[in-house]
Amino acid sequence: MHSIAQYRTKFISYLESRTKTKEPKNLYEPITYILGLGGKRLRPVLTLMAAEIFDKNYSEALDAALAIEVFHNFSLVHDDIMDAAPLRRGKSTVHEKWDVNTAILSGDAMLITAYQLFENYEVNIFRDLARLFGTTALQVCEGQQYDVDFETREDVTVPEYLKMIEYKTAVLVGAALKMGGIVAGASEADQNHIYQFGRNLGIAFQLQDDYLDAFGDPKTFGKQVGGDIIANKKTFLYLTACELASEEQKRALEHLFSIYPKDVTDKVNTVKEIFEQSTAVEKTQEAIKEYTHGAFEVLDKLKISAEKRALLETFGKQLMHREA
């Protein structure tokens, strides 16, 4: 087994060897660009790690890992178009650097490329990888649509929100791990268990992101604190507060989430006070613990050594350990 940093280094080396700009340049250069912008490379690292968890050399999972990373970045290209986002990881987004039509077409080519990478495996593995990938890719699209719909809906429920973050974020984490299991020839039970580990951890991570967006330390969180409140995003905190707050607090929340003041300080502070007073903060922290615990419980069902189980536990703890 290798460390997370070692898997990341090995994957980046493989990524760089496989992403060369070819003709037509205006189709492939944006792909090389977005794949070269960096990021944690979390999902492909998980695929490589899972392959070795189930006793297969990580190198045999590199194409599956690359497919996951290409697909993830494809989704970012199209999400950035939908959000009219000017920056991605501190650099111009593809549609800003080129144009919307180029970004759409290059994104489409990335999706096709991701599928093609599975052709490098023998037929049974190819079939299982393609089936999982197809299901997951469609769920990610569904999750994105739910997210878009929620922007204009006033009746979003907590279960609906949990389904949205499961599809938009968590299923790809689960799929990355399961793909490593498929390549390694793990049992169907172990494949499903490691998928559930990733899915639960992905939900916990997103809920923690909601919490830290409002209550995190800007020095360690890495994003503007209060950004979701400023953008009127219906997060787990907001939806839970709406369920638990007094009628007066609920009316105040609904009003504050309908305006875009120039000075956002009072809005952010008032919303955070309601989150705390309504016990939405406590409920969010409880949900984070519940999904994290659920992820670690699944590990006990995996037929792997205690050492490998500890490696997955360490990864989960590192992922969830972000300063508040």
Image (cartoon, rainbow, N blue to C red):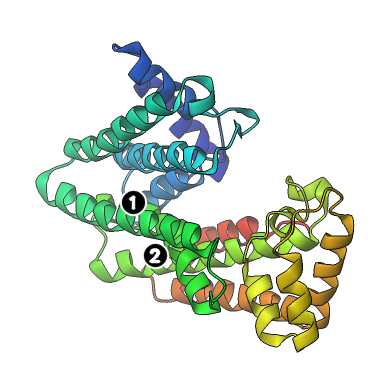
Say which element carries label 2.
helix
Q: Residue at x 54, y 25 (%)?
A: 96
Q: Residue at x 49, y 59 (%)?
A: 147
- Identify the mark at residue 194; answer none if there is no mark: 2
- Label 2: how many residues lie within 10 Å, few (<14), some (14-19) or many (20+)? many
- Tell me the amino acid under the disc marked 2: Ile
Q: Residue at x 51, y 76 (%)?
A: 294
Task: Residue 243: give x, y in percent of width and height.
Answer: 65, 85
- Judge by depth and name the residue closer to the eye, 297 or 309: 297
- Tell me the amino acid under the disc marked 1: Gly
The C terminus lies in quadrant: bottom right
Q: Residue at x 27, y 33 (%)?
A: 113
Relative horizontal placement of residue 320, taking residue 10 as reference (left or right): right
Relative horizontal placement of residue 123, taking residue 303 as reference (left or right): left
Q: Is the Cβ of the residue at disc 2 closer than 8 Å to that at disc 1?
A: yes
Say which element carries label 1.
helix
Instruction: Name above or below for residue 43 compared with residue 109.
Output: below
Q: How far apart in space, not on screen, are marks 2 and 1 (Cα)?
A: 10 Å
Relative horizontal placement of residue 200, taking residue 283 as reference (left or right): left
Q: Which circle's residue, 2 or 1, is located before the other in the chain?
A: 1
- Judge by depth and name the residue closer to the eye, 57 or 62: 62
Instruction: Name above or below for residue 190 compared with residue 104.
Output: below
Which quarter of the picture shows residue 197?
bottom left
Q: Is residue 276 visible?
A: yes
Task: Residue 88: give x, y in percent of width and height.
Answer: 59, 34
Task: Residue 244: give x, y in percent of width and height.
Answer: 70, 86
Relative horizontal placement of residue 282, taking residue 268 as reference (left or right): left
Instruction: Name above or below for residue 81 compared with residue 308.
Output: above
- Identify the mark at residue 314; answer none if there is no mark: none
- Identify the mark at residue 180; answer none if there is no mark: 1
Task: Residue 122: give x, y in percent of width and height.
Answer: 13, 43
